[in-house]
Image (cartoon, rainbow, N blue to C red):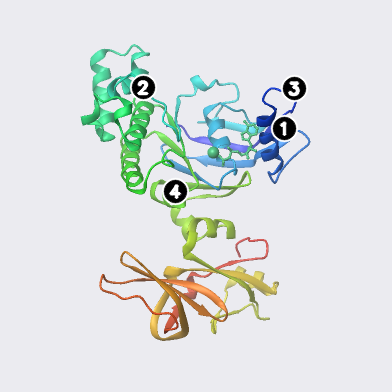
Amino acid sequence: MPEIVFDDVTKIYPFQKITGIIGRREKEKIRKAQMQMPYLTNEGVIALQHCSVTIPDASFAVILGPSGSGKSTLLRLIAGLEKPSVGTLTFDGVDMYDVKPEDRDTAMVFQEYALYPNQTVYQNVAFPLEVKHMPREEVEQEVNKICSLMGLSDKLDRLPQDLSGGERQRVCIARAMVRKPAVLLLDEPLSNLDVQMKDSLKAELKRVHQQYRTTFVYVTHDQEDAMALADRIIILKDGIVQMSDTPETVYRMPANRFCAEFVQASSMNILEDIPVQSDGSLQIFGMRYEPQGAQKKKLQKLKKVCAGIRSSDIRIQKGGIPAPVEYCEMIEDKRIVHVRIEDREISVIEHVGDSAMPYLHGEEIGIIPDLGTLQLFDEDGERL
Ligand code: ADP
Ligand code: MG
């Protein structure tokens, strides 16, 4: 429920000391991984730097980034398992530095399932309420409510060993939510599940979030999960926040090339080294791109830029720019066509009916890019 604000937070982990003989191999491994991180100081590894983000009250925030980018560190700071080295973290304006983890009203769900093996689903979920000495009828009411939302109503008498991976993760989420924490922290909770299981669990998570209005902070490296779940996405790279915005803005107006490529995954065509004309305009596959206002001024100072265009923003049409087909993939009702043009390979997504046939290698088609959707980045990858 609270608004969570990071104000210029930096987290430095001390270097792993390698002393003594016991556990030496393990310590050396940790130290080696640390030395591969891009930002080091005399004191240690910078896992998060100058992080200023706001997670609004009752939002579903997703922390998105590759492995080692500092996602779990951000979550552990909210939980109170780590303290900021520099900067402040507040919940509703209250500095959390001296607030113990158990006093923060947060609950956490991990990738691995931690359930009591000898207790039933009902007993596992009821446990956090029983330790609070809640009256039996109330416990029953709350357990039934969350288990019904999580699709567990007919599994209450089962033991964890008789559940599938997805069902066990549902129980973990139900147990975390049953005492209505102010903040639910989820660290890659769906990573061990198959695609179908993931989809149904995502729908349940959304439903629980809407019903309880708890602030959710969900960590993942999967951009599809982020797009499906978030009302706010925070993109991390090397411990630095790249962007914090709505999924729509992250998709339409990525702050830099890293965000564009990370969020669009395979569907973003990146065209390197496009020369800039002296008036700031660009020639893209023989079509003229005319920049406006501030973008024009910036372009006029550059010799070349990098342009990104989504596969779905290119049309296939007779009379378009001629492009020979390299190969064509049919995926459900989509035709993903890879063409070669001006020595660049680009992909185009076309929505087609079930009976459509793939294009053949060497077949010439016409394409029309929608240059209004072009994303431009300078040499450093910053958005223009
Ligand atoms: P992510 O969850 O995005 O994979 P983490 O937040 O777990 O990233 O870690 C970021 C970096 O911080 C790691 O590469 C590691 O070097 C360092 N780190 C994380 N936890 C610790 C720790 N407990 N002690 C020392 N270094 C750590
Ligand atoms: Mg992690």
Depth check: 82 or 181 in front?
Answer: 82
Q: Would you say 242 lies left or right of 228 here?
A: right
Depth check: 294 or 145 in front?
Answer: 145
* Circle nearer the N terminus (3, 2): 3
Residue 230 placement (x, y as % from top left):
42, 46
Regarding mark 4 in the picture, which secondary structure is present there?
helix
Q: Amino acid at mark 4?
A: Ala
Which residue is label 1 attached to? 15
Q: CA distance from mark 1 to mark 4?
A: 32 Å
Which quadrant would residue 125 be assigned to in this image?
Answer: top left
In which quadrant is the C terminus drawn?
Answer: bottom right
* Circle nearer the N terminus (1, 3): 1
Label 3 environment density (alpha carbons within 10 Å; few <14, some 14–19, many ≥20): few
Q: Would you say 316 lies left or right of 22 here?
A: left
Which quadrant would residue 147 be assigned to in this image?
Answer: top left
Mark 2 vs mark 1, foreground winner is: 2
Q: Which mark is residue 117?
A: 2
Residue reaching furthest to the right = 42
Q: Residue at x 61, y 79 (%)?
A: 281
Residue 173 visible at all: yes
* Circle nearer the N terminus (1, 4): 1
* Circle nearer the N terminus (2, 1): 1
Q: Amino acid at mark 2?
A: Pro
Regarding mark 2 in the picture, which secondary structure is present there?
loop
Mark 1 vs mark 3, foreground winner is: 3
Q: CA distance from mark 1 to mark 3?
A: 16 Å
Residue 242 placement (x, y as % from top left):
59, 50
Q: Which mark is residue 84?
A: none
* Circle nearer the N terminus (4, 2): 2
Q: CA distance from mark 4 to mark 2?
A: 31 Å
Which residue is label 4 attached to? 226
Q: Which mark is residue 20?
A: 3
